């Protein structure tokens, strides 16, 4: 059974439809990249998957033991978030709050999990540093460690390399690749078609108001739209 299935979703806000008829499935261990033009509704789709927005119609189903509060989320950073005056350890630990219900303090297990994920992302030496004093790449690793505190099953990443320099971008994609190799299911929104094709197992390509393609990466590269975008990115098919 799939971890996540979206069936005939219609999405929008204030009565205006942004996407319609969206259907796709995600199995444990998949690496799904969601691509498409700016403003096509990719972030709206991800927020709907997270139950932060309610679909106008259609169904979102969870399986394979996945619960909504077991999905780790790395949103696009805002200017305010980049200037957050907390320590790295505090930011990472806050990822445990979604699983703790009404509890406002961290258990010993929560604290241990945060330490493990800081080690895992190579940021343990920065634990006492102020988050806002870090580089963009370091901040993204902190937020990725925070997302991992929410789950070991599925990560939703919204443009995780946005605003990073080429070196930090390559490093971020490599960290995500390692997490996927360790068994974490990944859903990633990206405008970077080259990275999407390099790392993804599956592609969901969204156009204006509808899905243009959903399937495996190899099938995508053989499709008309996949070949067109691969040509634009200089990708060998």
Image (spheres, helix red, strand yellow):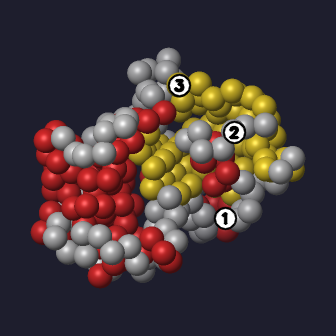
The 10 Å Cα crowd at callout 1, few under 14, some 14 to 19, many 20 or more, is few
Answer above or below: position of 23 versus 105.
Answer: above
Q: Is residue 174 left or right of residue 193?
A: left
The 10 Å Cα crowd at callout 2, few under 14, some 14 to 19, many 20 or more, is some
Residue position marked by numbered label 1 in the rendering: 231
The 10 Å Cα crowd at callout 3, few under 14, some 14 to 19, many 20 or more, is some
Residue position marked by numbered label 2 in the rendering: 54
The answer to whether residue 171 is visible is no
Q: Position of residue 162 (x, y in %)?
A: 51, 71
Q: Is residue 218 left or right of residue 121?
A: right
Eye-nearest disc, 1 or 3: 3
Nearer to me, 54 or 194? 54
Residue at the top extreme? 1
Residue position marked by numbered label 3 in the rendering: 62
Say if mark 1 contacts mark 3, CB within 8 Å.
no
- The tag earlier along the polypeptide, 3 or 2, is 2
SS for dot 2: loop
> What residue do we see at 56% from left, 55% from top?
189
Cα–Cα span, label 1 and label 2 = 36 Å
Among the 4 quarters of the image, the one containing residue 37: bottom right
SS for dot 1: helix
- The tag earlier along the polypeptide, 1 or 2, is 2
Cα–Cα span, label 1 and label 3 = 36 Å
């Amino acid at each position: 059974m799939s971890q996540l299935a979206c069936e005939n979703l219609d999405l929008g806000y204030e009565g205006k439809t942004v996407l319609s008829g969206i259907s796709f499935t995600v199995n444990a261990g998949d690496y799904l990249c969601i691509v498409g033009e700016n403003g096509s509704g990719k972030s709206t789709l991800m927020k709907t998957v997270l139950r932060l927005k309610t679909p106008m119609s259609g169904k979102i189903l969870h399986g394979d033991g996945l619960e909504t509060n077991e999905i780790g989320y790395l949103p696009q950073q805002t200017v305010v978030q980049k200037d957050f005056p907390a320590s790295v350890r505090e930011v990472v630990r806050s990822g445990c709050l979604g699983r703790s219900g009404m509890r406002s303090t961290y258990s010993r297990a929560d604290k241990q999990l945060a330490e493990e994920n800081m080690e895992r992302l190579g940021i343990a030496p920065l634990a006492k540093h102020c988050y806002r004093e870090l580089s963009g790449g370091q901040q993204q690793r902190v937020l990725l460690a925070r997302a991992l505190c929410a789950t070991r099953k599925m990560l939703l990443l919204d443009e995780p390399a946005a605003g990073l320099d080429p070196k930090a971008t390559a490093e971020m994609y490599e960290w995500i690749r390692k997490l996927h190799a360790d068994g974490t299911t990944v859903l990633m929104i990206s405008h970077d078609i080259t990275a999407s094709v390099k790392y993804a197992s599956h592609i969901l390509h969204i156009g204006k108001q509808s899905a243009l393609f959903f399937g495996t990466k190899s099938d995508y590269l053989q499709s008309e739209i996949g070949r067109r975008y691969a040509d634009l990115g200089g990708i060998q098919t």
